[in-house]
Image: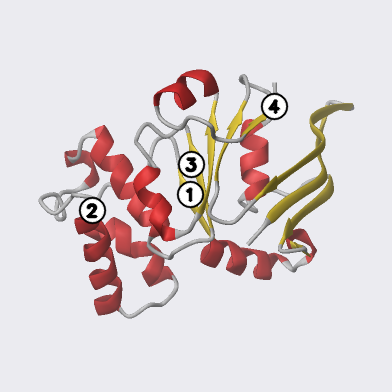
Amino acid sequence: MQIKLQNLCKVYDLQNKKLIVLNKLNCQFESGGMYVITGISGSGKSTLIHILGTLDFPSNGKVLWDNCDIFSLKESEIAEFRNRNIGFVFQFHQLLPDLNALENVQLPLLIQRTNLKIAKEKALDLLLRIGLNERLYHKSRELSGGEQQRVALARALITKPKLLLADEPTGNLDQDAEFGTTIIIVTHNANLFIENRYKQLPVCNLE
């Protein structure tokens, strides 16, 4: 699976003025690779990640998945594509507070109408693999920040997405490379991030 951005543009109309956030951006992400998108606040990181995740539409240009222009599909088809192919790890995790770790992780499969028993078995296996065997039935507010992010990672990976989008992750994502998922990391401080965790990663700098 290859993702290619061709002349990607995003323009907002603000009080009769045009705000250009992304201007003819071209880059490419290969299957199973890990990449970093960096830039200061307001440089377009969030806009780009939303477009990559099909949560927002570009003003011009294309997002090609294996040469298929994803935004040429109907909105219902885009939503289905997103649910089956893209996982998200947000900066503040966004776990459901009334659900325990196991329930949070199995939720994406239930949304896809997977059998409850199968969904639970897959979620259990994934949580055991990332070392949360003693925290399965703890609700998210009872978990540490690091544990919450691991649960969020497991939730994002449970459907075996082709693309994982991670916003300012604080944990190590190396363990997830075995899933064959393309990982795109968004951060405002690439130098510190890469120096400490992911040396030699390709960087797309929006500054």
- Whether residue 189 is visible, yes or no, is no
**Residue bearing mark 2:** 101
Vertical placement of residue 117 versus 145, above or below: below
Q: Distance of mark 4 from mark 1, alpha carbons? A: 20 Å
In the rendering, at what x and y percent does residue 168 appear?
47, 31
Q: Which mark is residue 88?
A: 1
Left or right: where 120 falls relative to 61: left
In the rendering, at what x and y percent does residue 79 appear?
61, 64
Q: Distance of mark 4 from mark 3, alpha carbons? A: 16 Å
Decide which of 55, 155 is in the foreground and name it: 155
Q: Which mark is residue 108?
A: none
Q: Disc 4 residue type?
A: Leu
Question: What SS does tag 3 mark?
Answer: strand
Look at discs 2 and 4 and give the one toward the viewer.
4
Would you call the spot at circle 1 few (<14 residues within 10 Å), some (14-19), or many (20 or more)? many
Q: Disc 2 residue type?
A: Ala
In the rendering, at what x and y percent does residue 191 appear?
52, 19
State if disc 2 and disc 3 touch (CB < 8 Å). no
Q: Which color scheme did the rendering employ for the protein?
A: secondary structure
Would you call the spot at circle 4 few (<14 residues within 10 Å), some (14-19), or many (20 or more)? some
Q: Which mark is residue 206?
A: 4
Q: Distance of mark 1 from mark 2, alpha carbons? A: 16 Å
Would you call the spot at circle 2 few (<14 residues within 10 Å), some (14-19), or many (20 or more)? many
